[in-house]
Amino acid sequence: MTLTELARKLRPLIEQAVESLDDETAVQGVQLFPAWAAGVAVQVGQRYQYNGQLYKVVQAHTTQADWTPDKTPALWAAVAADPQQGTVDNPIPAVRGMEYTYGLYYSDGGTVYLCKRTGEEDGGTVVLQYLPHELVGQYFEEVKAT
């Protein structure tokens, strides 16, 4: 059996096994998850990779070409990176459609932003379709370099 044949044989087992991983571990092996594709019936909680980012299904649906995970936050949430990130010195890379946590820091285009909204307590979360630089004054404040 060639390596390619072995890889094809093992792929379904790998995809089944990674479903048991928690999100923190899963983001370390994004390539182990099935790639997003149009025309697939997906269920809540399933995870797929798209453009190098891991996404989780938040509403069951059949995928469509123009409903990519990065453009449909009602259907998909980006799985956050390492929970040790989120400090001003180690901000979380922001992507469209991800779940943001109030009180944590995010990087977008080389700039650091604090996720903060009047009336919301630190630790609360929100899924946003937009990047931090697009929501300054609403959900984010820019952190000035010192």
Image (cartoon, rainbow, N blue to C red):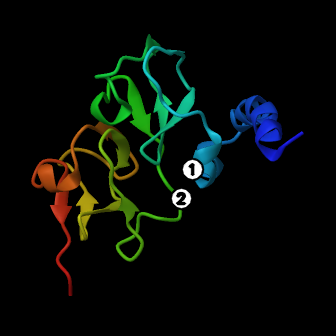
Q: Is label 2 or label 1 in front?
A: 1
Q: Which of the labelled discs sits on residue 27, or is there none?
A: 1
Q: Which of the labelled discs sits on residue 82, or is there none?
A: 2
Which of these two is toward me, 31 or 92? Answer: 31
Report the residue at 53% width, 34% height from top: 35
Name the image quarter holding the N terminus. top right
Task: Look at the numbered discs 2 and 1 and tell me whether their residues touch, using CB distance below 8 Å.
Answer: yes
The CA span between labels 2 and 1 is: 8 Å
Report the residue at 41% width, 63% height from top: 86
Which of these two is toward me, 76 or 115? Answer: 76
**In the rendered image of this protein, does residue 121 appear above or below residue 12?**
below
Q: Quick one: which residue is furthest to the bottom in this view?
A: 146
Report the residue at 9% width, 53% height from top: 137
Residue type pointed to by label 1: Val
x and y, in percent, of residue 144 in the image: 17, 77
Report the residue at 25% width, 70% height from top: 110
**Disc 2 on helix, strand or loop?**
loop
Residue type pointed to by label 2: Asp
x and y, in percent, of residue 37 in the image: 47, 25
